[in-house]
Every structure is written in structure tokens, then in C-alpha cells.
Image (cartoon, rainbow, N blue to C red):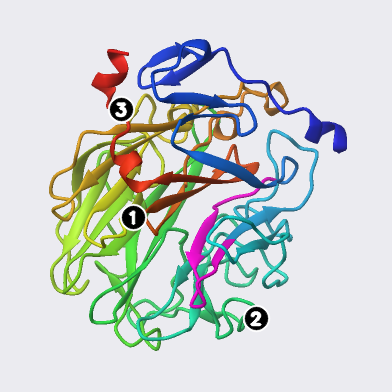
């Protein structure tokens, strides 16, 4: 396996930026190619690979600031395999243990990191780390899909639950499973960040797959419904919004809506974005603490079949929406995966009612890997990023190509001054 690890792909001669292919030797002003990371980055951005797994794959990289002020990064880490086209590290469709949760800790705000360690383990797989520190506590919670084999449909729908840590993420409780009062036995998928409202209400997105069938490109596809799980008593009881299964949100034209990301805007207002296949991120809003919601509708943000990546800036007022700003495919096909190769940023200062012009952040710069046999899902992956806004810096965490856990840093003001598409075309 060592030989495989050494076969890193070279930088590509042509990089896709916006809708154009740009020679790597003639990148726009203010951009550089980083051979060590395999990315095109702003000159103001620095970064490093914290961990690599080209054999079993690694998945959603999620970081939080712990109660003690450390950075704690966690992600599912696939067990080793030589099957390059279909690495077995993702929980979906698995009836055996194929991954573990892995963690790294930084005590100096990302300047240095511990060796990787297993924060907790069990005999079933993991989907991702969804952190929450309830207001006024030092309790660190780890939410997410819990595909315990007896609470799992064998494809992707599984129980949703969480663990608690009272010692800054060093030891963890057993899983507490969510059993909504109005939908007992709820199963779905949940890997997007959750939120706590000003009243202390917990909201976490979960979507369900209802049917699976082959796509014309050979990719699996499914009909999905999107829900929010809501608890007004810190996890003691839960209900399902907008309604119990099977009456979740979906886009009528595609029968899909996935990976909702709610974010509290203060008071009783909560804004949320969802993944669709329409070429736009869709959005919905609640003005009554997550009890009722507006009918989901398209936002102006251009995005392929990929998750929303929505965060609050350090001022706790500005919304930062990272999106791919490209849409050339539909559901999970090669074009949709290729669209994930670049990342842009739009900001909103009015709670998501209007958005700034997108600014170019980064792009994959590595050639496709022939060992992946055309697997664009892996070759172009610059999605599922996570962001911390701390001390005037933005820290981005990305599972690049589902092989590398990457940490990137840029001053917040520098990020807001990155080039727009118009500026790039005039470069």
C-alpha cells in the first residue's frame, strides 16, 4: 500500500475557474497553485494536510471550539482497502464495520495538532460529527446518523442520535437515540451542522431516502424527503418538522431535498438552506423558534447536487454561504461531481434575504487519477467544507478528494476581498 500512497497525482496544466479553463501557469492575480495541497488558493490563504487516507477514504471533516478553547476536528476514517473506484469507508450500504471516527486536537487554535486518535468506538460505522455545546454549559455533544445495524435499513436511513462529553471531548457517553413523539422509529441521514436558538431549542436536519434505483449514468439515485428534528427541552423529547414521515419537504420536479442546514439568527428567527438538484440552493425560514416554516424556495446561489455550507461570521450577524457557483449536471452524475471542484463565497447581512456577488475562493488543481476509473465523485471533491470564525481568521476544513483532511486559514477581511467572476474575466 505504500506504493499507492506515493502515487500522488501531479498538478493539472489547466484549472477550471468559473466556467473557463485557465492555464496553471497564468492564474489570476492574487492566486497561486499549492503543489503540496493540490489546490489553487488565494495568496492570503495558508494551509496544511492534517491526515491522509487514500485507501479507505475519509469523509466529512468537522471542527469545533471546545469548552476549554481547543480546536477538535473529527471525521469518519475508512478502513484500508485497495478498491480505488469504490472505497468502502462510507457507512452507506454497509453491513460490516468499514470505518471509525478519528480526531485531532489543537491547543493553539490550529497552529499545531495532536496525532490522530479514536475519540470513541463501537461495532457500527459513523457518518460524521455534528457538534453542539448547549448554551450556558460545558457539555460537548456529538450528533449525527447512527447506523447501528439493528437501527439501519441497510442503504442509508438509520437512527439519529448523540453522545455527550463532560471533559472537553476526551471521553464520551453511549449514544442517546432520538425517538420523536410524533414519529417513533424515525430513521434518516444527518451530517449537516445543527443550531440552538435563543430560547435553547435544538434543531437538526435529517433527510430520508425513500426509493433507490439505477441512474442512467450508472450512479445510484433516490427519492428523498427533508425534515427537521426539534427539541425544546434539550433532547428530552423531540418532534418532526414540517410534518412526520412521509410528508417532508421536497422539490416536486426532482422528488428530492437533502442535507438541510439550519442556523439561528437570534430571537425566534431561524434560517435554513438545503441541497437540491435544481442548480440552486433552496431556503426556508422560521420566525417562531422552529415551529413553523416558510415554503422552501430557490435562493439566488448557484450550486450543483452538493450540500449547503452555511456559517456565521465572527460578528454573529453576517451569513457566509460557501457554494460551488456552477451547475452543469443533475443528480450525482459526473457533471454534478465535477462542479464540486471549485469553491466560492457569498455573504448576507440581512439574514439571507439578499446575497453579495460570489467571490472565488479555491479550486482543485490535481489531475484526475486513472486508478479511480473516472470516479469524478472522488477526483474533483472540494465540497462538504466546515468553517470556524475565530480571532479575525476563517479556518476552513475540507475532505479534499475524500482522501485528505485539509486545514486552510485566511484573514476574514482578505476573504471578503477575493475576486468576483467579473474581476477574474478581466485578469
Q: Element under label 1?
A: strand
**Neighbour tally class for label 1: few under 14, some 14-19, many 20 plus, Cα within 10 Å:** many
**Neighbour tally class for label 2: few under 14, some 14-19, many 20 plus, Cα within 10 Å:** few
Label 1, label 3: how many angstroms apart (C-alpha)? 20 Å
> Which disc, if any, is residue 171?
2
Q: Position of residue 195 (x, y in %)?
A: 34, 68
Q: Is residue 357 left or right of residue 226?
A: left
Residue 373 shown in magenta = no
Task: Kindly identify the residue that appears in the image at 63 percent across and 72 percent down.
Answer: 150
Earlier sequence position, callout 3 versus callout 2: 2
Rendered position, 166 above or below 142 = below
Please name the residue that numbered disc 1 is placed on.
311
Q: Position of residue 42 (x, y in %)?
A: 43, 31
Residue 232 visible in rendering = yes
The image shows a total of numbered marks equal to 3
Q: Is residue 279 left or right of residue 208?
A: left
Task: Kindly identify the residue that appears in the image at 21 percent across and 33 percent down.
Answer: 357
> Which disc, if any, is residue 22?
none
Label 3, label 2: how many angstroms apart (C-alpha)? 44 Å
Q: Badges 2 and 1: C-beta atoms under 8 Å apart?
A: no
Q: Element under label 3?
A: loop
Magenta-colored span: 57-73
Q: Position of residue 124 (x, y in %)?
A: 68, 67
Amino acid at each position: 500500500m505504500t506504493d499507492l500512497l506515493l502515487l500522488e497525482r501531479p498538478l493539472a496544466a489547466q484549472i477550471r475557474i468559473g466556467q473557463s479553463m485557465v492555464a496553471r501557469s497564468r492564474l489570476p492575480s492574487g492566486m497561486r497553485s499549492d503543489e503540496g495541497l493540490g489546490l489553487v488558493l488565494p495568496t492570503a490563504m495558508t494551509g496544511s494536510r492534517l491526515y491522509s487516507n487514500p485507501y479507505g477514504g475519509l469523509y466529512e471533516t468537522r471542527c469545533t471550539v471546545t469548552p476549554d478553547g481547543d480546536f477538535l476536528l473529527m471525521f469518519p476514517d475508512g478502513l484500508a482497502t485497495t478498491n480505488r473506484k469504490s472505497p468502502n469507508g462510507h457507512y452507506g450500504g454497509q453491513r460490516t464495520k468499514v470505518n471509525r471516527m478519528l480526531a485531532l486536537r489543537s491547543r493553539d487554535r490550529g497552529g499545531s495538532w495532536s496525532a490522530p486518535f479514536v475519540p470513541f468506538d463501537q461495532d457500527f460505522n459513523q457518518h460524521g460529527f455534528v457538534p453542539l455545546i448547549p448554551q450556558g454549559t460545558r457539555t460537548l455533544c456529538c450528533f449525527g446518523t447512527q447506523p447501528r445495524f439493528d437501527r439501519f435499513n441497510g442503504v442509508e436511513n438509520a437512527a439519529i442520535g448523540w453522545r455527550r462529553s463532560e471533559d472537553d471531548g476526551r471521553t464520551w457517553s453511549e449514544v442517546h437515540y432520538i425517538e420523536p413523539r410524533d414519529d417513533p422509529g424515525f430513521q434518516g441521514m444527518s451530517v449537516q451542522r445543527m443550531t440552538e436558538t435563543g430560547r435553547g431549542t435544538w434543531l437538526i436536519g435529517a433527510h430520508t431516502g425513500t426509493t433507490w434505483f439505477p441512474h442512467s449514468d450508472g450512479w445510484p439515485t433516490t427519492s428523498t424527503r427533508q425534515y427537521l428534528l426539534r427539541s425544546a427541552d434539550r433532547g428530552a423529547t423531540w418532534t418532526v418538522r414540517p410534518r412526520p414521515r412521509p410528508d417532508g419537504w421536497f422539490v416536486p420536479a426532482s422528488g428530492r431535498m437533502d442535507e438541510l442546514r439550519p442556523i439561528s439568527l437570534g430571537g425566534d428567527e431561524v434560517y435554513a438552506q438545503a441541497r437540491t438538484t435544481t442548480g440552486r440552493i433552496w431556503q426556508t425560514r422560521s420566525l417562531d423558534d422552529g415551529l413553523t416554516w416558510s415554503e422552501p424556495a430557490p435562493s439566488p446561489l448557484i450550486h450543483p447536487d452538493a450540500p449547503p455550507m452555511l456559517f456565521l461570521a465572527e460578528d454573529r450577524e453576517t451569513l457566509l454561504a460557501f457554494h460551488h457557483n456552477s451547475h452543469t449536471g443533475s443528480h450525482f452524475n459526473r457533471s454534478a461531481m465535477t462542479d464540486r471542484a471549485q469553491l466560492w463565497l457569498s455573504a448576507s447581512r440581512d439574514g439571507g434575504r439578499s446575497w453579495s456577488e460570489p467571490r472565488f475562493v479555491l479550486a482543485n488543481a490535481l489531475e484526475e487519477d486513472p486508478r479511480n476509473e473516472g470516479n469524478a465523485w472522488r477526483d474533483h471533491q472540494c465540497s462538504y467544507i466546515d468553517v470556524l470564525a475565530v480571532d479575525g481568521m476563517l479556518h476552513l476544513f475540507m475532505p479534499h478528494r475524500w482522501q485528505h483532511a485539509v486545514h486552510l486559514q485566511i484573514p476574514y477581511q482578505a476573504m471578503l476581498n477575493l475576486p468576483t467572476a467579473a474581476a477574474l474575466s478581466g485578469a
